[in-house]
Amino acid sequence: MSKDVVADLKRDYITRLLAKGMRSDGRQFDEMRSLKVETNYIGSAQGSALVHLGDTTVVVGVKLILGAPFPDTPNTGVLTTNAELIPMASETFESGPPDQTSIEVARVVDRGIREGHAVDLEKLCLEPGKQVWIMFVDVHVLDYDGNLFDAASIGANAAFKTAMVPNKAAGLGEDVPLPVKHQPISITVVKIDGKLLVDPTHDEERVADARLTVATIETGNLCAMQKGLDGAFTLDEVLKVVETSSRIGAEIRSKL
Amino acid sequence: MGGAPTDLKLIDERGLRLDGRRPDEMRPLKIEAGVLNKADGSAFVEWGMNKVMAAVYGPRECHPRHLQNTERALVQCHYNMASFSVEDRKRPGPDRRSHEISKILSEALTHVVFTEYFPRTSIDVYIEVLQANAGTRCAGLTAASVALADAGVPMRDLVASVAAGKVANTIVLDLGKEEDNFGQADIPVGYVPRTDEVVLLQMDGDLTREEFDKGLHMAVGACKKVYEVQRDALKRRYSARAEGQEEGA
Amino acid sequence: MGSNDSKEAAREIVVPGELLAISSKRAGPGTFSEGGKIYAAHLGIKSVRPDSISVVPLSGQYMPMRGDLVVGKIIGVGSSNWLVDINSPYPSPLHVNEVPWRVEFGETRKFMSVGDIVLLKIVGVDEIKRISVSMQDHGLRKLTGGMVVELSPSKVPRVIGKNGSMIQTMKTMTGCRIYVGQNGRIWIDGELDNMVLAVKAIKMIEDEAHNLGLTEKVKRFLEENQVKGA
């Protein structure tokens, strides 16, 4: 953990810079880091994307397998989201079963794509109550410099856009594009010393007081949120984060 | 090693394999060193349809403590397959196969690392298979060597690795997916070119002694080519920057 | 410092196990010899001297050496020592006898506590890499305020520069107080704008550690961006 030892010493520097309107990497408060997305990256998945958000790198793989629907939703396919925060990506990640952090990442990503109806799950039903497509969204983090929520959410949406339903292999006719409905993009903002910063780096996350992730769809409507960390937001701040997230979310959506 | 379906011809009339390779031909191999930011060293290997990332952390304080060796560093490999890396989704987390691979890769790498320089530490090597298409342990070992060197870890040499095998009664190099599934034998080899030593060797299937001899030599010959690609990746990583090195203080 | 042939050779990048020479030269740092041949022990730049051959590292962890100045962080406090992280695989105890104050048994916390940053010297490394550190020498002290940036320990010589020229330039032009630890940690304190400038200059050195004329380039950068009044 040697490298993380000095991280807390940066708090004072980061807050002094923020007071002057500066971030340690030179970005504006509402500026995302550079984003690079490569789709169809994994041949063994039905859809996939390699996402570089600044120095954060994640691979999202989408796989569809046949299975039974949940009894209470016999007419819809099943969506399962999983995140692996493997120790390759950071000294702060440990091997072993998913911990609270990776479960939170998986659940927040899941909520965005589920509630934002990224994929029309009803079209993934083959025989009500009997057979549906089970869609696995697996997030594999390779390099961690903060803001997994957004990198993973962007990656999932990019992967859906190019994913194919593997009908042929299942003897169900020709492969067809995954029925994509919306593109719910999540944008995360952290609060440090009363300042609101979009797309935090790991250094910024470490000293952040509070975090808010907001997912929006094309209409500007909200579909999922998650507040994190032990600080708090004022109501005005919450509304400001919502405004910022929806604006930046739209910019990113137009690039995918 | 199972029998091939009768309609699958692993080697055709011209003596070529399913993907058009000659028996002694390797799949295309590409290596890039230093691709990750957080790790102390890293390497990405694309080998045929395989995509494998390796990252190194350390030498660092050894955890758990009881594994500490007062005389040397512990090289700990962690081989893992991403759930989307194979046709049927793999359940996340290590299974018995990946534990075994992690162990033999750790042992192979320990042989070349100057572990005695770093008593009581651990050198952690993470190997993530992102896309699997037969030969991932060899690709992982090849990537791990480059990642270790990239991390500045002192080593006696790099370990290069490739498998030979037997399909349709022919000894072939670097088995592909179908050849692995329906071939007659598989021999993954890890090799240290400088000292001409074998540090990884497994075999499953059925081989005559002559066939094994031929396969082993075929793999070793190919390891020397793999080594050239490894070396080139490491030199490329720094060569642009090294132009005009001036003396330090 | 380097003769002509060392300058030429300095450009050659070598990988672990690569043959460097079949000769009677001494196997210097970063190399090993076997059967009368000298090989590279790690990735780096080949450096040939009249009597020896060595490999200058391009990466790697900090390995403590006797006499090194290091920036450490207190990570534990005992009744007669502090435990210090010095960015090496080995945390080191700092004994009360090795600090510039008289500390009674059990009173360590009154002087330094977890999180404090200290400037130390490595005074001993034994065969199983147990490290002894001391704060009893000119200039060694607890560092208050400021911040610490980290870079690869292999690049520390470039930050210091030839005979300390690089670090002196940075100090003069930014007006910051700067301590460079051999362990890849640099402590900086000063006016905020100047600190930003110093951090940028260090980043520049890190990114271009192997470029010719780096000192001049950094100097030009600092001149162009100098904060008025510094």
Image: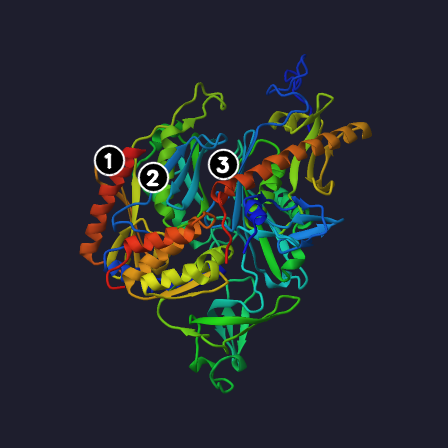
Q: From this viewpoint, is residue A77 visible?
A: no
User: What's the chain of the residue with tag 3?
Assistant: B
Estimate how packed mark 3 is, as few (under 14), some (14 to 19) or many (20 or more) residues with alpha carbons within 10 Å.
many
Kind of element beneath mark 2 = helix
Label pair 2/3, CB-CB below 8 angstroms: no
Is C199 situated left or right of C161 in this image? left
Q: Say yes or no: labels 2 and 3 on the same chain.
A: no
Mark 2 and mark 3: span between their CA atoms?
19 Å
Q: Position of residue B244 (x, y in %)?
A: 48, 45
Task: Choose between B211 and A80: the one closer to the eye.
Answer: B211
Q: Position of residue B182 (x, y in %)?
A: 66, 25
The amino acid pointed to by label 1 is Glu
Q: Position of residue B185 (x, y in %)?
A: 71, 29
Estimate how packed mark 2 is, as few (under 14), some (14 to 19) or many (20 or more) residues with alpha carbons within 10 Å.
many
Task: Please tell me which of labels 2 and 1 falls first in the chain.
Answer: 2
User: What's the chain of the residue with tag 2?
Assistant: A
Q: Say yes or no: labels 1 and 3 on the same chain.
A: no
In the drawing, what numbered circle is on residue A218?
A: 1
Task: Choose between A247 and B231: the one closer to the eye.
Answer: B231
Residue corresponding to mark 3: B84
Kind of element beneath mark 1 = loop
